[in-house]
Image (tube, rainbow, N blue to C red):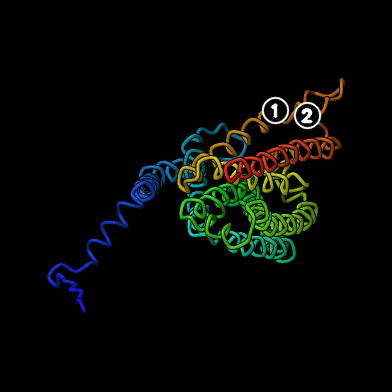
Amino acid sequence: MTALSVSVNAGHPASPRLLRWLVRLHRPALWTWAAVIVVLAAALLWLAGPLTDASADAWRQYDACKPGTACSYDQDAILRYKDVYNYTTWAVLVLPFVVAAWSGAALIVWSVFVLGAVGGLVWLTEVRADVVRAELKSCPVLTVYCDPLYGPSSDYAGYLSWISTLAYYSFWGVAAWAGASLIGRELESGTARLAWTQGVTPTRWLTAKLAVPALVLTLGGTLFVFVFRWAWAAHRDLVTGDWTFNDAFAARGPALVAWSLCALAVGTLTALLLRRSLPALAVSVAVMITLNQYLEKHRTDLWPKKPSSSGEHPASHFWPMNLIETGILLTIAALTTTAAFWTLRRRTA
């Protein structure tokens, strides 16, 4: 009989080695998150310091203006503060979606967001609107508080705009999740190949991976669109935005759902092509941003304008334009999904 001797070096525990291995494994992700945090922190410090001081000085100049007289104040400082505030707020709100995409919990986070957004729209319409109207009735003339762009009506419109904006651009998170966690991580870790050896064909595996998210995105997006259309029409005098605004245009029609389904398909194909979670996350989001910018730029060309119009589309053109954009996105989604299944079959044949 032979004895197997195993020597254990008690003086060098495995924990530091494991930690170094984990850091080396996730080095690209750590560098990416560190860069995001540094940029966001710098923007917040800029917002809290010089931008706030300049904006406060501009508001004091505005408050000193007398009715009926020429007034000069630094409007650029106010708008610059508002822009940076909006961008940093948007980044802070979207960051959990990106983290969730990396961790695999994005679908749960997105569902919670949709339910929260629907609840927020109901509160805004049934409760907040009455408060805003009461505040407007008691407004003195020409004060910052009663300014149409910054007063109570702006507060109401701002909430509505933020909800629709987050819902509209949530498809970036969908693309990130599909690319990084839903498909990319399983391919990278070998979990998908293990499933294929357990009697599950690659085609069936991918179908199951896409069916539930597609159903949840469709149902959740449809619910949001119906509630947002109701909230948008309930108090139009308090809403400063126009129907042609990007977020309002998408959130009031089926294009919102189409964007999410298109992002799901693009993220899936990207993950199958790259087979790495972090690169798939970055590329899928970049593709969706590029597509979004292109369609927004050419959105006014989707439907012919009336010869007698002033160069702008009338409100009656909303549905034709929204449905055409929806058709374009669903066509891209169908072609991309077909390419994803073809790629999977080709690589697993």
- At 54% from the left and 62% from the top, the residue drawn is 105
User: Residue 253: where, in percent of width, then height?
Assistant: 78, 47
Element type where label 2 sits in the image: loop
- At 80% from the left and 52% from the top, the residue drawn is 233
Residue 302: mark: 2
Using the image as rendered, state which of residue 84 and residue 319 is in the foreground. 319
Element type where label 1 sits in the image: loop
Give the position of the C terminus as an image quadrant: top right
Q: Which residue is mark 1?
A: 298
- On the rendered structure, is 58 left or right of 4? right
Judge whether residue 137 can be spotted in this image. Answer: no
Q: Amino acid at mark 2?
A: Leu
Mark 1 touches mark 2? (CB < 8 Å): yes
Q: Quadrant of residue 339?
A: top right
Q: Amino acid at mark 1?
A: His
- At 61% from the left and 33% from the top, the residue drawn is 293
Q: Quadrant of residue 69?
A: top right
Instruction: Categorize mark 1 by other alpha carbons within 10 Å: few (<14), some (14-19), many (20+).
Output: few
Compared with 251, 307 (above or below) is above
User: Residue 294: where, in percent of width, then height?
Assistant: 64, 30
Using the image as rendered, state which of residue 50 and residue 161 is in the foreground. 161
Q: Quadrant of residue 331?
A: top right
